[in-house]
Amino acid sequence: MKLKLLALALVLGATTAATTASAQDVNGFFLQGSLGSASSTANDFDDEVTSFQFNGGYRWGVFGLEAGYVDFDGFEGENNNFDLEADISGFTLGGNVRTSFADGWYLGARAGAFFWEGDADTVVPSSTSPTSFLVVRQDVDNTDFYAGVSVGYDFNEQFSVGVAYDYFGPEDDEVSLEANVLSIVGELRF
C-alpha cells in the first residue's frame, strides 16, 4: 500500500510541476521503448527480472495519451520449500505529462490502467505417492493501475533518452506481484 501511495504522490507531483513549468510546444505522435530491471517482493516472491515496454501515443503540448505493452521475465519465489515461478505481461492505456525544465532536459509522469495476465507454476508432492510430484499451474488476469515518473534529455526535436521509475500493481485473489521497474527509455517523435 505504501508503494501505491508513493507512486501516486510522484505522479501528482510531476503533474503539478509540468503544469506550472513552461510548456513544450510539441504536438504529435511518439513511440517509446524501454529496457529495465523489475523487482517484486510481494507474497512469496523476492526477485529481480528483466522487463521491457513499448508505448505509443499522441501529445498535445505537455499532455498526452498512451497505449503500450509490458512484459516481465519469470519472477521466482518459494512457498513452504516449493519453488514458484510467475510470468506477468499485459497492455497499458493511460495519460502522460512531459515538460522541459532546463535546456534540453525533460520531466515526465504517467498513469493509467494495466490490463494484465499471468501464470504461476509450482511443483508439489503428489497425494498418491510421496516420491512423485505434480506441476500446478494457475492462470489469472485482471485490470489494475500503473504509474511512473521519468527524467531525461532531448537530443533534438525527434529523439530523447531518459531514466524512468514505474510501478505496476498486478493483484488478484490468487496472485499478487506488485513490480517496481527502473529502466532506460528511448523516445522517437514525429
Image (tube, rainbow, N blue to C red):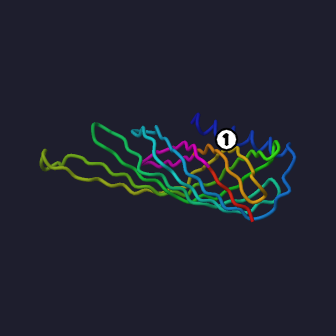
Location of residue 92 in the rendering, given as x and y in whole percent from the top left corner? 60, 58
Q: Does residue 180 show up magenta in the picture?
A: yes
Which image quadrant is residue 165 in? top right
The count of marks equals 1
- Which residue is drawn at the image coordinates 60% and 48% (left, top)? 184
Closer-to-camera residue (48/155) = 155
Give the extent of the magenta segment. 168-184
153, 92: nearer the viewer: 153
Q: What residue did someone put label 1 on? A: 8
Give SS at disc 1: helix
Picture coordinates of residue 16, whole percent (x, y): 80, 42
Looking at the picture, which amino acid does disc 1 mark? Leu
At which x and y percent is residue 50?
48, 48
Say which quadrant the C terminus sits in. bottom right
Question: Is 70 positioned to the left or the right of 187 in the image?
Answer: left
Between residues 147 and 151, which one lies in front from this camera angle? 151
Residue drawn at (74%, 65%) of the image? 29
54 w.r.t. 84: above or below: below
Tell me the quarter of the image containing the N terminus. top right
Specify few, some or many for label 1: CA neighbours under 10 Å numbering under 14, 14-19, or 20 or more. some
Residue 166 image position (x, y, % from top left):
60, 45
Which residue is outermost to the top?
Answer: 2
Residue 131 drawn in magenta: no
Please give left or right for residue 164 compared with residue 155 in the image. left
Q: Compared with residue 20, is residue 141 higher up or lower down, i.e. above or below? A: below
